[in-house]
Amino acid sequence: MEKEKRTEIGSIGEFGLIDTIRETVTLYHPGTLKGIGDDAAVLGPTELVRVVTTDMLLEGVHFDLSYTPLTHLGFKAVAVNVSDVAAMNAIPTQVTVSLALSNRFSVEAVAAIYEGINLAAAHYKVDVVGGDTTASRTGLVISVTAIGEAKKGEICYRSGAKINDIICVTGDLGGAFMGLQVLEREKQVYLADPKMQPRLDAYSYVTGRQLRPDARMDIVHELRDLHVVPTSMIDVSDGLASELFHICQASDVGVAIYEDKLPIDKQTYDTAFEFNMDPITSVLNGGEDYELLFTIDQKDFPSLEKHPDIHFIGHVTAADQGKLLITKSQTAVPLKAQGWKHF
Amino acid sequence: MEKEKRTEIGSIGEFGLIDTIRETVTLYHPGTLKGIGDDAAVLGPTELVRVVTTDMLLEGVHFDLSYTPLTHLGFKAVAVNVSDVAAMNAIPTQVTVSLALSNRFSVEAVAAIYEGINLAAAHYKVDVVGGDTTASRTGLVISVTAIGEAKKGEICYRSGAKINDIICVTGDLGGAFMGLQVLEREKQVYLADPKMQPRLDAYSYVTGRQLRPDARMDIVHELRDLHVVPTSMIDVSDGLASELFHICQASDVGVAIYEDKLPIDKQTYDTAFEFNMDPITSVLNGGEDYELLFTIDQKDFPSLEKHPDIHFIGHVTAADQGKLLITKSQTAVPLKAQGWKHF
């Protein structure tokens, strides 16, 4: 096997590295007056409101490079921020990317991360306008800030849900969590016996959900085409139950959701079963699906009713009704929000 | 001595921590429609252009907590980003702050960091509008993104310097670098014998320059009052020589600067002397002073001539004239840019 080329970052220096990165970047928005290469990026004036969000991913906490390809990681770092822009019902326009790299990482490794960043930039039509590249004593840190635009009346907060609104969720849930379980199991098998090859073929959907999530910008564009503005919206990064709690708290409402309406992919279901887990637990408390959870006024239901990828999982109630899961046997049990605990 | 109170972050959780932080934050700009507490912050429309910049500080690379008070660190993390906004000749309006914390850090430590962040926010009148708080396996990471505003014609790029422009620099240079030398020396003394108390009283100016730099927003406001728009501008984060190289490259010009015009504080000079260093080296290649380096058209010279804190250190030449330092003995020597090397 040919040995992979390895160029030390020290041999080209920080400014050399920035020049290398800059050459790979494409700009899509005429409103980006200046991208990488000055003290700050410059964005032209717009009549739209702008949204700003930021998320930091750390090696050993948010990702494990023993099973995460660097290109997927670069894509994911952008996608999770675009997902937050989508959750405001806004269109992403620019991102900044800061990387901290230990000396384990070569120029080629940075190029692989940027390949993913640039793929995501092309996919979501966002301009990489700046960032920071620095050394790290230990491992990789990626911090992304995303900026987006929307008309003021289009912005969806967590706080707008009203009693009797219909609760909607896109795609399916729990897959990213089950994908993580599979990846962690195969890693342990490999560590115990490096001759064992990971068996991942049967789990490609759930591992893909974990390693290369896609922000649901398609839904944001479709909602615009259908002239539907959700009354509240949030993305599912910490788990459905946790996100419902955020909407309830911000909107001062309760919710009732129905177990038999919750969307789950067959592979997620089967994998949960194999791991002796209740599939509903992965749906309610698994994180990182990056689907959209939103509430709509009942008048908008006919516009979305036939959408193949929007699921109507329950309705908004008064705050004193609590947060309830109606099981398949028609029993109402209180929802528990576990979410992700990194601390 | 009373034992300091220590609350584990795990005991209040990530959301509890975010709530604690949110309560300490003040908003100054009516244009901030939504700050912390949703998927993204929301900024109202403006006729101005917006600038965006980001900088990440890592423990062990950019700061050493054995001599850096957490409150100063929080202040500095905001100030270095505001300095990049200042370098565009823009007014900072919002920042996002992401923190990654290992379990060494308590809720009280986060409060101390935010005390500094909030002091800087008040000092520069910027709104802390969001961020991310997460666990770290090793040490503290602070990633700040700053947004600012200016009229389109006010924005200063690195690329606008013209032949015969006058080169200006604010304040004095080299202090932050000498401060770092003192702090590192006293740390080694302390490590060798913990009974030795650090002797820092005589070095308060230079250590202050290192630990708690101030972005020169005062200069940006004064330039506006005087109706002077620099032809190019950059902040001195990597060292004067390195920043001059950036302007030369972006503007396709050369420079000639005069050794006897370079501003240096007496304490910086004396400390360099004590360390057997050439004071001019600290001025040219010491970083982190966060002063402003800019070029002006000669017609603007009378407006700034009497300014007590702006120094005229040379002039812009044709690119083929090179980048020259004219020594006190009237010898022209090529400038060398060393800058900071973290890699």
Image: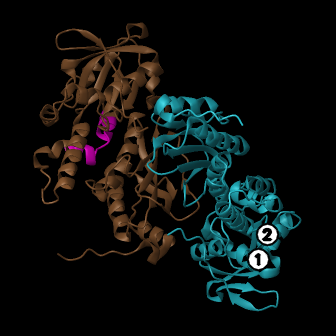
Chain colours: A brown, B cyan
Q: Secondary structure at mark 1?
A: helix
Query: How busy is the neighbourhood of tag 2: few (under 14 within 10 Å), some, or many (20 plus)?
Result: many
Residue A156 within the magenta-colored segment of the rendering: no
The quarter holding residue A105 reads bottom left
Q: Amino acid at mark 2?
A: Thr
Range of magenta residues: A207-222
Q: Give above or below for B117 relative to A165.
A: below
Give me the disc on residue B279.
1
Of A147 and A100, nearer the camera is A100
Chain letter of the residue beneath label 2 in the structure image? B
Of B195 and B184, nearer the camera is B195
* Image point (59%, 70%), residue name: B340
Name the outermost residue toward the right: B306
Residue linked to disc 2: B268
Q: Left or right of B300: which side holds B49?
A: left
- Residue B320: x percent and y percent? 62, 88
- The reply to whether dot 1 and dot 2 touch (C-beta < 8 Å) is yes
- Residue A320: x percent and y percent? 42, 7
